Amino acid sequence: MGQGLSCGANQENEFYGAVKVGDIETVEALLKREPSLLYHTTVYDRLSALHIATANGQIEILGILLEKSSNPDVVNRHKQTPLMLAAMHGKISCVKKLIEAGANILMFDSLHGRTCLHYAAYYGHFDCLQAILSAAQSSHVAVSWGYARFVNIRDARGATPLHLASRQRRPECVHILLDNGALVCASTGGYGFPGSTSLHLAARGGSLDCIRKLLAWGADRLQRDASGRIPYVVALKYKHRACAALLNPSSAEPLVWPAPLKFISELNDEAKSLLEQALMEANREREKNILKGTSYALPSPSPVHSDSGLDDTISEASDAEVCCICFEQICTIEFQDCGHQMCAQCTLALCCHNKPNPTTAHVTPPLCPFCRSTIVRLVVAKIKDCDDADHEMDISSPKLRKIILDTKLRESDPRTLVPTKVPVLKIGEC
Ligand SMILES: [Zn+2]
Ligand SMILES: [Zn+2]
């Protein structure tokens, strides 16, 4: 397959060239004349037309090829599937199209034993990473393999997608993987330095953002690699001074995302992004003190989730809805079933207060500080607009406010609810 006489070779080259540049007319004409071109591959790398189309993001050509029923999982010389190449080159539309066509997300290449998830994480294409994870959730993979196992899938040298994203300085991918259950303390077999954790690899790569995320998800600064080094030592060795400052075991501990709490895993996106924002803000304040001596200038806060539609209702709301714990922030999170409200910062501190004990799987959910009832769920607080004509109830007492629908606030950017100057939050304040 693949090699023919010289006229056949010319035809092949013309075909691959047309696939590469997205010349639909030529591709269709050549396929009509010689349908078997679909199954030919290049001489050396054994690339099929599907590989060439996906690597170059030619979505229309890909559609034509898939319609003619070619196998979406055809492999090249290195046993790479078209899906792996699409994830490598960040061609998200091709990734989606291949998954729709039934491409198998659980194939391993022969180079490093990596899957398409490894490729997306390594090259930092978080949209592709997300698409593959969504596919894993709804496919046979979740049933036969288990979703958590897929997220933590290892390559031939024991590297998970989280290891690769951490080493390659891909904070968005690190975030998505952690959010989907990637094990933050898993160590590699032979990848990087033996026994490295994601935190070691992030220290080696020197990405402060990756280190922030890993620490916020509970990465252990004291975990050692096979030669007994903690991540701090690795950062020092490669002269990443700011990273070393955060990794220094003697510097203040960051707030950690309370992942094991049941209601945290069930948060809706809006409430989750509010709390994550609060977490990053609180840790940023802590960083300011840690990095003071390192001459490292903190970058402006990067939004975790980008929403649109800012408006000015917040300043009005802030008069009426001050958090009764800190008296600084406005209430943005409501506890259910009791209906009490607090700001995101205080909610987070409350949830981080009871750190899960690693030796016991059991985690007791925190109690509402106002009425001591168990918190079943967290939702984004709905606040009444002050301009609204029909005041149905007195909201002057922020301690006990009922849910009042305010679409205006809900449409606004949750980030604006958190002032940029946030006081350092002490755990246990609640
Ligand atoms: Zn508060
Ligand atoms: Zn309560």
Image: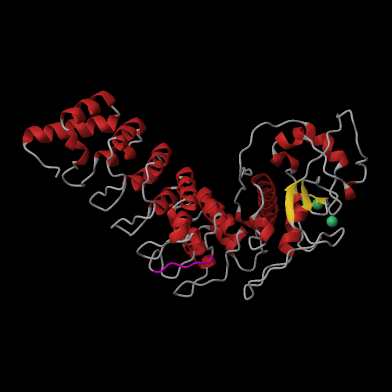
Viewer-proximal residue among 17 and 376? 376
Give the residue drawn at x 54%, y 59%. Answer: 181
In the rendered view, does 87 fall on the left or right side of 207?
left
Viewer-proximal residue among 187 and 137? 137
In the rendered view, does 164 fall on the left or right side of 219?
left
- Can residue 167 be seen from the camera position used here? no
Residue 291's x, y, as percent?
63, 56
Quadrant including the C terminus: bottom right
Magenta segment, which residues?
185-189
Task: Indicate yes or no whether the magenta region holds residue 188.
Answer: yes
Q: Residue furthest top?
A: 25
Viewer-proximal residue among 175 and 106? 106
Q: Main secondary structure of the magenta part?
A: loop
Give the residue drawn at x 76%, y 36%. Answer: 409
Residue 410's x, y, as percent?
73, 37
Above or below for 242 versus 102: below
Residue 207's x, y, as percent?
51, 53
Above or below for 127 versus 180: above
User: Residue 22 sits in which quadrant?
Assistant: top left
In the rendered view, does 285 fall on the left or right side of 368?
left
Type of colouring = secondary structure
User: Residue 140 sits in which quadrant?
Assistant: bottom left
In the rendered view, does 265 fall on the left or right side of 396?
left
Viewer-proximal residue among 276 and 283? 276
